[in-house]
């Protein structure tokens, strides 16, 4: 599979060596649009990785998969262009920054011969084990989910090249809720199979000061947010996302997911890494599962997407999943702005509509 890096910003520098380590994948080059504010980043990545620097149109024409790694506000534009050229597309997280762009992606995917998916963490060993536990009925019916997602600093350049790529709404679409809310919302959808009907959220965005300082305050965006979700069938969930001075684990991101069921619960701790299952009768078991969640999940994501293409399978994360996750994050932004007002996530409009 020939992979093109469509704009070499954010995580592209980490994806290139990982892609090159996988059998059956060739990274053919880096490309960007004329006038891109980050054309220099794409050129620098191409030089550092020893890859050709291509024009976007030529690069898309010569690839099987376009991996879109621009600043988030351009994700949808680049992905739609590649889909319209008939290419398969993987979009870095978040795949879109608002439901209108998520709908554009969905409509482009419906028209395209190519498959669309996005970067996610659903292939982490801990989350996969939790999903099997839920599906087995070991904890009964899922009734509540609690997810915590914390980033350990990183705006000094160690994990994010420049703070504005996360904090400037003109580039990022928002703060940490947009940046990281994508992951826990997708996890909740994956574990329960239920749609979110209502969101209540509070955040540290303006007019509030950021909880942990840093550049978020200068841009008026949150460094922390808490969401309460009402799902179908009366199921509830909470999501906490934040960028904190120090994480709770050894890596740059710390995450845990707990599913409370009618007859027990399962906890997936991606830092330990550990999965714990407890039953109502008092029995419990804990088992170390897998290694670093991020690298394992990405390796599986890339290889599984290639197999989806080869065998005509539906990707684990589809255009519908992308739209649903983006709409929940967007509703969280609106709720927090309204001081915790309940907001229903946007649904897909008839083709040509302008929602969001």
Image (cartoon, helix red, strand yellow):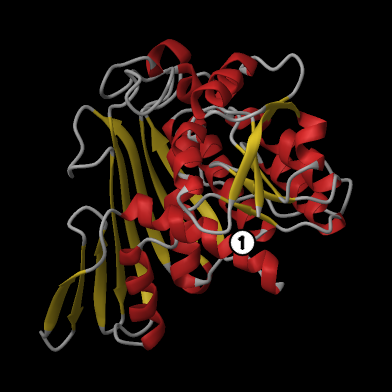
Kindly give the residue lying farthest to the left in the view shown: 282
Kindly give the residue lying farthest to the front in the view shown: 50
Q: Quadrant of the C terminus?
A: top right
Q: What is the x, y in percent for residue 257?
A: 31, 60
Determine the image quadrant of residue 350: bottom right
Question: In the shown orientation, is residue 74 left or right of residue 301?
Answer: right
Closer-to-camera residue (104/324): 104
Secondary structure under tag 1 reads helix
**310 vs 42: above or below:** below
Residue 5 in view in this figure? no
Q: Residues within 10 Å of mark 1 (few under 14, many from 20)?
A: many
Closer-to-camera residue (284/298): 298
Q: What is the x, y in percent for residue 199?
A: 50, 50
Q: Quadrant of the N terminus?
A: bottom right
Q: What is the x, y in percent for residue 102?
A: 69, 45
Image point (19%, 83%), residue name: 279
Closer-to-camera residue (117/53): 53
Image point (44%, 56%), residue name: 299
Determine the image quadrant of residue 221: top left
Image point (52%, 46%), residue name: 342
**66 vs 314: above or below:** above
Q: Which residue is mark 1?
A: 306
């Amino acid at each position: 599979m020939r992979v093109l890096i469509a704009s070499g910003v954010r995580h592209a520098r980490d994806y290139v060596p990982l892609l090159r380590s996988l059998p059956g994948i060739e990274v053919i080059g880096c490309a960007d649009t004329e006038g891109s504010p980050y054309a220099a980043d794409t050129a620098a990545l191409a030089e550092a990785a020893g890859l050709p620097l291509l024009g976007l149109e030529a690069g898309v024409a010569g690839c099987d998969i376009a991996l879109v790694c621009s600043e988030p506000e351009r994700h949808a534009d680049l992905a739609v262009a590649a889909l319209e050229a008939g290419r398969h597309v993987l979009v870095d997280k978040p795949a879109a920054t608002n439901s209108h762009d998520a709908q554009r992606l969905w409509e482009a995917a419906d028209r395209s011969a190519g498959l669309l998916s996005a970067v996610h963490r659903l292939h982490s060993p801990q989350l996969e084990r939790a999903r099997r536990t839920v599906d087995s009925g070991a904890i009964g019916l899922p009734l509540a989910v609690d997810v915590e997602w914390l980033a350990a600093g990183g705006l000094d350049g160690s994990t994010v090249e420049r703070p504005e790529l996360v904090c400037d709404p003109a580039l990022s679409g928002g703060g940490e809720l947009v940046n990281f809310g994508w992951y826990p919302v997708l996890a909740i959808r994956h574990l329960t199979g239920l749609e979110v009907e209502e969101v209540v959220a509070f955040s540290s965005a303006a007019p509030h000061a950021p909880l942990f300082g840093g550049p978020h305050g200068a841009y008026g965006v949150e460094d922390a947010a808490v969401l309460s979700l009402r799902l179908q069938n009366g199921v509830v969930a909470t999501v906490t996302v934040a960028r904190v001075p120090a994480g709770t684990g050894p890596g740059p991101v710390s995450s845990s997911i707990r599913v409370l069921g009618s007859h027990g619960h399962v906890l997936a701790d991606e830092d330990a890494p550990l999965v714990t299952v407890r039953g109502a009768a008092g029995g419990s078991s804990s088992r170390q599962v897998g290694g670093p969640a991020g690298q394992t999940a990405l390796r599986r994501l890339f290889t599984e997407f290639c197999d989806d293409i080869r065998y005509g399978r539906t990707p684990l994360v589809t255009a519908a999943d992308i739209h649903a996750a983006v709409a929940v994050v967007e509703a969280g932004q609106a709720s927090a702005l309204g001081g915790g007002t309940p907001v229903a996530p946007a649904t897909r409009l008839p083709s040509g509509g302008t929602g969001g």
